[in-house]
């Protein structure tokens, strides 16, 4: 599958700078479909492309990976390697909102 929406999602995710994250909803909105956050998640889960998938998280800052082959701790470690502090609260791995990308490359 390589629909126009899928290509837009891949293109946006490639723009997320190192040391920043975006939510599934942010990515969907930047692709012109603000209500397609779940579709973004599905595309990431099934993507065979070399993209920085680990920079996409839940809107509340949770690492919400749903792939049993890649634990949330691995995604957290990848983000930490980029300088993002990972917090743990009530059993959830979290990224502070200050690390969210605003859509610019700064």
Image: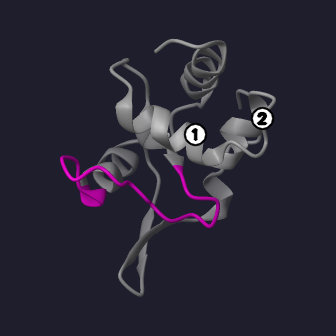
Q: Which of disc 1 and disc 2 is earlier in sequence?
A: 2
Report the front residue among 90 and 29. 29
From the top left corner, tell me how far across and down residue 11 is, in percent. 60, 17
With respect to residue 84, does 18 lie above or below?
A: above
Q: Is residue 29 visible?
A: yes
Left of 27 or right of it: where is 70? left
Residue under numbered circle 1: 39
Give yes or no for residue 76 being in the magenta stretch: no
Q: Residue 33 has which mark?
A: 2
Q: Residue furthest left?
A: 69
Quadrant in the rendering for residue 89:
bottom left
Q: Residues within 10 Å of mark 1 (few under 14, many from 20)?
A: some
Q: Give, as a single range, the part of the protein colored magenta.
A: 57-73
Q: Residue at x 78, y 35 (%)?
A: 33
Q: Determine if residue 103 is in view.
A: no
Residue 15, picture quadrant: top right
Residue shown at 38% from the left, 54% from the top: 65
């Amino acid at each position: 599958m390589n629909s126009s929406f899928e290509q837009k999602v891949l293109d946006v995710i490639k723009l997320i700078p190192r040391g920043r994250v975006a939510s599934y909803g942010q990515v969907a909105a930047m692709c012109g479909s603000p209500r397609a956050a779940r579709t973004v998640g599905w595309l990431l889960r099934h993507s065979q492309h070399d993209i920085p998938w680990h920079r996409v998280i839940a809107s509340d800052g949770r690492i919400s990976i749903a792939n049993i082959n890649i634990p949330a701790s691995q995604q957290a470690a990848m983000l930490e390697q980029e300088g993002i502090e990972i917090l743990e609260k009530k059993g959830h791995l979290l990224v502070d909102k200050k690390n969210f990308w605003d859509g610019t490359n700064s």
